[in-house]
Amino acid sequence: MKTRPVRTAIGFILALAMLPAVGCAAEPAPPGAPAPAPAPETAPTTARILFLHHSTGECVWNGGVADWFTAYNAAHKTHYTITEQAFPKDSPYGWENYPYDYWNIWVRHAGPKPYREEPTLEILAPKYDVIVLKHCFPVSSIEPDSGQPDVASSDKRVENYKLQYAALKAKMREFPKVRFLVWTGAALLKGETDEDAARRAKAFFDWVRNEWDSQGDNIFVWDFRGLETEGGLYLKAAYAAGDSHPNETFSRKVAPLFCRRIVDVVQGRGDTANITGEGGAEAPASAVSPPGEADGPPAPPAAPPPPREPPPEPPAEPAPPPEPAPEPEAGAAGPSASPAAEAGAWIFDDAENPARRASLWGDAASYVQDTGASVIRIHFAAAPEEDWGDYGKQRVVFTRPPQKNYDLRPYRYLAMHMKADREMEVVLTLVTLPDPAGPRDQPHFSFTAYLRPTAGEWKTVTLDLGKLELAVAGEGAYEKAGSPPRPNDLTMLRFVTNSRNAGAVFLVEDVTFYRDLPDSLRGTVPEP
């Protein structure tokens, strides 16, 4: 388990939209002075856009933002380029992107040098024409005011937020050629907050829309919260991915609205267009559009983000068993067709790469915070239910298959940390499909272990890949693979629990394959 300051992902996004000509640095205005946004007679054909985000922003990005701009540029002969990155990064600053953190980096530590490796506005302004930034949904976990507001306090209180926003507004106005687009903060599900905190969050972001945002300057708002809540206090359950992250359907629906809002700001309509992006810049027919909208077809599935870069090649000598099956061809999706072994280990997932989650899990899991670390929450409640006869009804979660199977031959063990909110059994299966792009019900085989997490406590389990339970479905696949006594070619992991545990909070972390058992894991290998 990694230890670091507790942090949660929330969805607050600012969009800095700097509209000088390419290569022209933005000049600071006098501190606090209103910064009139440039309104050229002809809409600019070039804009450089930077989207700073954490996990909620990643969900919307994966809803088709890049594809929308590609189609828009082709249809309108523009060159609006958009780039995304995590801000602030996990290390060394920490996974915190609340009002305090933007104030801390951009106001308190303003200047030409990065603060804890994070760029200040003095660094960003010359490089981009549009910069989008966000808070994640814990920004809505607002405590009551103390009566002693403090701009330098990281406490989540309306009194502190307002001081931090006022200071950020003055700072952003120092860059009159830059346009800033601020997302209203992402909301929480009803079950993940209380009514008083939800009302405080709504009141603050109503204040952002109606009072803090001024006409005629270079700062604008996109009302993401309004789209999530439809005017209510909470993220609507139909839009959630099991926790307070937006699900894929909702993300695909609002991604074009986000893009339109950016274009409206770029083209000088930031103060007059709808702050949700609805009815904004016309989307080309080939761009991603919300399902059911009159001006465009339903959004195609968003392309998965690129996989984690593979580490160095594994040692030449493979782990057991002897006489392994031939390695799959090069070019498989995921870390590598033959997962590499740095120090004899390959991290399948450690919840540290948000882009990895979408390509590996889809909506089956999310990255959440627990005991100061980013961990994987598996959503059995959102998983399909299967009738297993005498064993009863089960909830089944799969990881997504790669283009070609991962090669596990260099590895002997699979280790992970796990935790649940109750005593329960989870069946973990390593599945091999001969054709990973084919249907799941094709003839295949798998190897299974039984996990029993401890209620309320983290527990480490290590599995010997040579001592798992074999199951064969259909004819021919197992024999054609050479009847291996252990998993050699991995298509997906499958997690199963009885439907009575559908509402369980089941967390895993550091899912890692090892060639040799590290000393720290000795004693964690259960008997078969």
Image: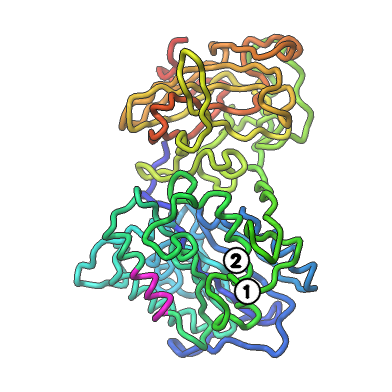
- At 36% from the left and 61% from the top, the residue drawn is 233
Q: Nearer the viewer, residue 275 or 293?
A: 293
Counting from the top left corner in percent of width and height, residue 198 is at 32, 60
Q: Secondary structure at mark 2?
A: helix
Total of numbered circles in the picture?
A: 2
Pick the quarter of the image with the N terminus. Answer: top left
Q: Amino acid at mark 2?
A: Leu
Residue found at the far left of this picture: 147
Residue 257 marker: 2
Between discs 2 and 1, the one toward the N terminus: 2
**Are circles 2 and 1 on residues that touch, CB within 8 Å?**
yes
Q: Is residue 519 visible?
A: no
Q: Is residue 509 above or below residue 211?
A: above
Q: Is residue 179 visible?
A: yes
Dot 2: within a 10 Å radius of its alpha carbon, few (fewer than 14), some, or many (20 or more) residues? many
Counting from the top left corner in percent of width and height, residue 237 is at 44, 50
Counting from the top left corner in percent of width and height, residue 244 is at 43, 51
Q: Is residue 112 above or below residue 101?
A: below
Query: Toward which corner of the image does residue 479 lie, by quadrant?
Result: top right
CA gap between label 2 and label 1 equals: 8 Å
Query: Toward which corner of the image does residue 478 lie, by quadrant?
Result: top right
The magenta region covers 203-212
Give the residue at mark 1. 280
Q: Along the horizontal axis of the image, is 300 left or right of 470?
A: right
Query: Is residue 61 on the magenta stretch?
Result: no
- At 37% from the left and 66% from the top, the residue drawn is 100
- Dominant SS in magenta: helix
Query: Toward which corner of the image does residue 18 lie, by quadrant?
Result: bottom right
- At 57% from the left and 49% from the top, the residue drawn is 248
